[in-house]
Amino acid sequence: MEFDVLTRPVGEWIVAAAVKNEVSLKPDPNALPGMPTAEKLVDGIAAFVILGCVLGALFGIGQWVLGSRTSNYSQADSGKSRALSALLGAFGVGALAAIINFFVDAGGQIK
């Protein structure tokens, strides 16, 4: 009586399992309970991030204006950078779903 499990190296079992079975992935938002709550949580976090971006843009614009009015070019430049960073952050939050969906669709087409 030969025990094939004990005599085969582990690598052969991994290769044999990979050849026999194909792995498939089909994301299903209804597969787990609590998914609507998780979606609301993510939407709420995104809203807080957007509010933070608005606040950062307001501070940046204010710093930019005060720096330029007082001829403090370092503060004006820092305010420009802060305002631009806040705007790019808001753009990133708004575009994130489309970017992720694009890569999910692109990855799903690989065979």
Image (tube, rainbow, N blue to C red):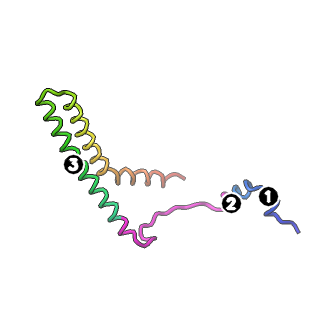
**CB atoms at circles 1 and 3 under 8 Å apart?**
no
Mark 2, residues whose alpha carbon is within 10 Å: few (<14), some, or many (≥20)?
A: few
Q: Which residue is mark 1?
A: 8
Which amino acid lies under the numbered mark 2 shown in the image of this protein?
Ala
Q: Residue type at mark 3?
A: Val
Q: Is residue 13 above or below residue 55?
A: below
| Secondary structure category for the residue under label 2 | helix
Disc 2: which residue: 17
Toward which corner of the image does residue 21 lie, by quadrant? Answer: bottom right
Gap in angstroms between the C-alphas marked 1 and 3: 62 Å
Quickly name the residue at label 3: 54
* Secondary structure character of the magenta stretch overall: loop
Q: Nearer the viewer, mark 2 or mark 3?
A: 3
Residue lying furthest left in this view?
Answer: 69
Taking the image as shown, residue 101 lies to the left or right of residue 65, namely right
Please tell me whether residue 111 belongs to the stretch shown in magenta.
no
- Name the residue: 16% across, 32% down: 67
N-terminal label among 2 and 3: 2
**Mark 3 surroundings within 10 Å by alpha-carbon count, few (fewer than 14), some (14 through 19), many (20 or more):** some
Q: In the rendered structure, which disc, 2 or 1, sits on the residue that comes first in sequence? A: 1
Q: Nearer the viewer, mark 2 or mark 1?
A: 1
Residue 63: x %, y % from top left: 17, 37
Which range of residues does the magenta coloring cover? 18-38
